[in-house]
Amino acid sequence: KPVLLLNGPNLNLLGQRDPFYYGDHSLDDIVLNVREFFESHSIELESYQSNHEGDLIDQLHRAHESYSGVLFNPGAYTHTSVALRDAVEAIAPPVIEVHISNVHNREKFREKSFIAPVSAGQIVGFGVESYLVAAFAMTKILKKER
Ligand code: DQA
């Protein structure tokens, strides 16, 4: 089964959105990079972005049947959404939480993650490379090397 790269609100604006925190790569660039990495491990990648909480929940539900794992950047919903947390908790495939910026050295409200306690792990603060670090970790989980 493929891996799902799931991105939440405002991540469609990558490239134009505050490059200090988020760099100047577009989401398409990132997806391409991550897909290349997974292909080198013979794993297929699908990508989905939505600005709507319910859409993200629907994708997580779909992941239960259709994906072997999920790389998930929930954007600002990280800090607010019990519903996304419950969805992550309810599904079997491992979910790795990803953040581009270091959410621990920004505003206080970004330190809290509703998703982290139900995730396989959390990767934060490596810029767009956070996604590649998470992809590496996912290959290890899928090959049961950790
Ligand atoms: C983010 C961090 C969140 O606090 C913020 O709301 C985002 C992006 C990140 O990738 O650094 O939208 O998830």
Image (spheres, rainbow, N blue to C red):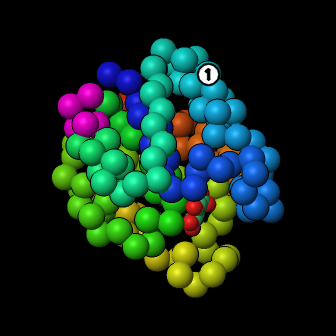
Crowd band around label 1 with a 10 angstrom C-alpha radius: few (<14), some (14–19), many (20+)? some
User: In the image, is the residue at mark 1 within 8 Å of ligand 1 by its beta carbon?
Assistant: no
Q: Is residue 124 magenta?
A: no
Answer above or below: position of 92 versus 124: above
Q: Residue at x 25, y 36 (%)?
A: 62
Q: Is residue 103 left or right of residue 114?
A: right
Q: Position of residue 121 (x, y in %)?
A: 43, 55
**Magenta stretch, overall SS:** helix
- Locate residue 37 relative to residue 80 in the image: left or right: right
Give the amino acid type for the residue marked by disc 1 in the picture.
Glu
Q: Is residue 110 above or below residue 50?
A: below
Nearer the observer, 146 or 55: 55
Q: Residue at x 48, y 33 (%)?
A: 47
Residue drawn 61% across the image and 74% down it = 104
Determine the image quadrant of residue 82: bottom left
Report the quarter where the C terminus lies: top left
The N terminus appears in which quarter of the rendering? top left
**Which residues fall within the magenta stretch?**
62-66
Q: Report if residue 60 is visible in the image.
A: no
**Residue 115 pos. (x, y %):** 37, 63
Q: Position of residue 19 (x, y in %)?
A: 79, 57
Q: Is residue 65 visible?
A: yes
Frontmost residue, 121 versus 74: 74
Q: Which residue is mark 1?
A: 36
In terms of secondary structure, where does tag 1 sit?
Answer: helix
The residue lying at 48 percent from left, 43 percent from top is 49
Ligand 1 is in which quadrant of the figure?
bottom right
Q: Position of residue 20 (x, y in %)?
A: 80, 62
